[in-house]
Amino acid sequence: MINSLAELEQVRRECKKMVTRRAGLSAGAAVIPIPGLDIGTDVSLLMALLPAINEKFGLSPTQIEQLHPNRKKYTLVAITGIGSRLIGSTVTRELVKMVLKRVGVRVATKSVARYVPIIGQAAAAGLSFSAMKVLGNAHIEDCYEVLKQVLETQPVEKADFITRVNTRVAGPGSDRQ
């Protein structure tokens, strides 16, 4: 569970590195001129990447289900506010295809471009890399914003909890706070 903005920043950096590695794999598949290989690779990569990002941020369906009720409530409200269908839910092929449609022009262009010798394959690899980076980094930013919103509400709860514990330990009317 991420409990500070510093931890949140660290997870964000780790996830961006993961996205860059997967984008490189996507670019490599785009170079190979086999029909459907690049799209199939992108779908497979995203089917693994998006849940891995959710997991790193503590936003997988299982992790959210195990949260304290207050934190779970704040998390679900933040997810709804962001409007992401990928956070806190099981990532399916249909969801991945929907996400790929967001960058549909790039996907279509790379599919056609890779049949042009050398220059086309290089362009397809570049488009594939950038499309994967855009999708992965957008998901990271959505996860980041969800947790940032949740963490911004947490200090009030922590302060309230500490006050209640100190009151119980010190007892009413005590000058200890």
Image: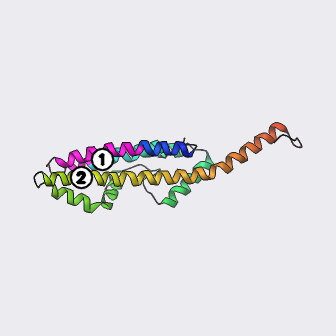
Residue segment shown in magenta: 15-41
Q: Residue at x 72, y 48 (%)?
A: 160
Q: Residue at x 76, y 44 (%)?
A: 163
Q: Which residue does the numbered mark 2 point to in the structure image?
A: 126
Give the answer, above or below, for where 75 lies relative to 170: below
Viewer-nearest residue: 32 or 60: 32
The answer to whether 130 appears left or right of 59 in the picture is left
Residue 79 position, x and y percent, is 51, 56
Viewer-nearest residue: 117 or 82: 117
Residue 78 position, x and y percent, is 54, 56
Q: Which mark is residue 23?
A: 1
| Residue lying furthest bottom | 105
Residue 25 in magenta? yes
Return the disc, 2 or 1, that comes first in the chain's sequence. Answer: 1
- How crowded pointer 2 is (Cα within 10 Å; few <14, some 14-19, many 20+) is rated as many
Amino acid type, residue under disc 1 in the picture: Ala
The answer to whether 131 appears left or right of 157 in the picture is left
Amino acid type, residue under disc 2 in the picture: Gly
